[in-house]
Image: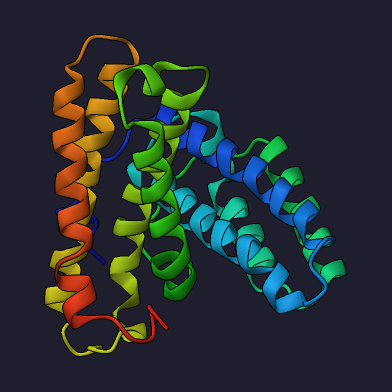
Amino acid sequence: MYSAEVDEFPSAENLESAIDSLVESLKRDVDDMEMIPDFEDGVLGVRRDANALAVVAMTLAVSGSDVAVAGVASDLIETSQALANAKTGDEVKSAYKALVDARSKTGKISKAEWKKVASLRPLMKYAIPSLSAEIKRLSRNEKTFLRASNARKVIDDSTVMVAIAMGCRENVDETLSPNDEKVWKEYCERLAATTLAFNKQANLAATKTGNFDDLKTAFKQVEETCNSTCHEKFGGKSAE
């Protein structure tokens, strides 16, 4: 239980937007499965985004936010987990419907404590690289960043990355160094901190109240953190 060591989260608005972005991505993932004959190949996107949604919902619950979606955070975690673990195409469709239904409801808001809600491999092997690549593509220059919905997408994706870093502290048992919990936790918290710093710059740049060069510098820090301890010490199961 590490909530006492987390002193800052993405904004409630960013977390809510990231949840809705992932729900939309999962709709595309489910639809895309129809075009891929092999189930295990087709379900990769679903597993990636469902696990990501579980940790974003967990982060929202722990943050103590009072936005309406926080009232169904536990239901979003449960339905995301069911979707992530679906074994057939019919199970995927049924689990996605349950997820959408959960998002549409309201509930009583109560603050939660950190617990393991997702699998490491879909997050570290697929989600983090995909999110990082998309952020880099959409923020390669200020004109691209500010075009259409690109800034919103960068903010959503960086919010998801922060949540993954926070949530994955619980998953040291899935790494190649399961006894090095302290080092793993420090790495995850460093990744969360650098990504949150970038997220803040993205929010400022989106409203033209920040310096785009600061955004670029902040993302370099994210990349350097991603390429450090995790790859060198904790690869293997998470990177197979």
- Say which residue appears at 32% left-offset and 11% top-offset: 207
Q: Is residue 139 left or right of residue 25?
A: left
Q: Is residue 206 above or below residue 93?
A: above
| Residue 65 spot, x, y in % from top left | 39, 34
Which quadrant of the rendered structure holds the N terminus?
Answer: bottom left
| Residue 102 spot, x, y in % from top left | 70, 46
Q: Is residue 109 left or right of residue 106?
A: left
Residue 198 picture quarter: top left
Give 182 or 193, whichever is nearer the viewer.
Answer: 193
Give 240 or 66, whichever is nearer the viewer.
Answer: 240
Q: Is residue 32 left or right of residue 11?
A: right
Q: Is residue 177 above or below residue 127?
A: below
Question: Can the viewer see residue 155 in this picture?
Answer: yes
Question: Can the viewer see residue 116 in this picture?
Answer: no
Q: Please count the marks in the image.
A: 0
- Say which residue appears at 24% left-offset and 40% top-offset: 196
| Residue 42 spot, x, y in % from top left | 72, 68
Colouring scheme applied when the structure was drawn: rainbow
Which quadrant of the rendered structure holds the C terminus?
Answer: bottom left
